[in-house]
Image (cartoon, grey):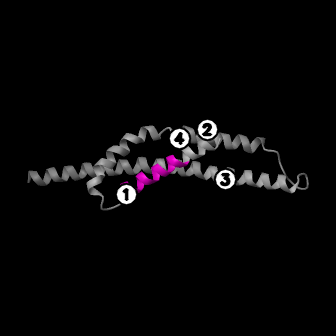
């Protein structure tokens, strides 16, 4: 079950790197290539959304079916295992939120960068016409 979290972590990391590269100033020479690569990867990265929803349902199911460990009903080792399970669920929920946030940022930033490029081309055409 850990492989799905590794895949989601790599996808969120790739999204974060692409957002960072698109927003860094001074990469004008690479920007057109980055835009083309990012626009090409937006559709495959859309599969992150249903994958995150599936993993979120998995966390919820594990939370609902987890044996409760309240009071003196469990040993210290069971209590520790219960706390570790809660911590892992919270960590995984944060990873899901980060992956969804980075996909949304990547989509939005790519759209804005494309519009800026189109406006710059339009401005150059107007300057050349005058």
Could you tell me how many numbered marks the image carries? 4
Whichever of labels 2 and 3 marks the residue nearer the N terminus, that label is 2
- Is 99 in front, or is 120? 99
The label shown at residue 54 is: 2
| On-image quarter of the N terminus | top right
Q: Name the residue under label 4.
A: 49
Q: Earlier in the sequence, mark 2 or mark 4?
A: 4
Residue at 42% of width from left, 38% of height from top?
43
Q: Nearer the viewer, residue 76 or 93?
A: 76
Neighbour class for label 2 at 10 Å: few (<14), some, many (≥20)? Answer: few
**If the image is split into quadrants, where does the C terminus sit?**
bottom left
Question: Pointer 3: residues within 10 angstroms few (<14), some, or many (20+)?
Answer: few
Magenta highlight range: 9-23
x%, y% of residue 29?
26, 55
Residues under labels 4 and 1: Cα distance? 23 Å
In the rendered image, residue 84 lying in the magenta stretch gets the answer no
User: Nearest the camera: 51 or 30?
Assistant: 30
Task: Assess whether mark 1 and mark 4 are in contact (beta carbons under 8 angstroms).
Answer: no
For label 3, the SS is helix
Q: Is residue 74 left or right of residue 84?
A: right
Query: Which disc is residue 23 wearing?
Result: 1
Q: Is mark 1 on a helix, strand or loop?
A: helix
Which residue is under mark 3? 90
**How far separated are the C-alphas under marks 3 and 4?**
18 Å
Magenta segment includes 10: yes
């Amino acid at each position: 079950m850990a492989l799905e979290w590794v895949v989601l972590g790599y996808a969120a990391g790739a999204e974060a790197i692409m957002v960072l590269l698109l927003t860094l100033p001074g990469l004008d020479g690479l920007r057109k290539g980055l835009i083309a690569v990012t626009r090409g990867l937006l559709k495959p990265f859309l599969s992150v959304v249903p994958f995150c929803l599936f993993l979120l349902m998995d966390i919820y199911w594990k939370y609902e079916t987890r044996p409760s460990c309240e009071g003196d009903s469990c040993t210290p080792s069971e209590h520790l295992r219960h706390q570790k399970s809660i911590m892992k669920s919270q960590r995984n929920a944060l990873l899901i939120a980060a992956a969804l946030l980075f996909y949304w940022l990547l989509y939005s930033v790519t759209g804005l960068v494309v519009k800026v490029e189109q406006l710059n081309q339009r401005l150059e055409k107007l300057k050349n016409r005058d």
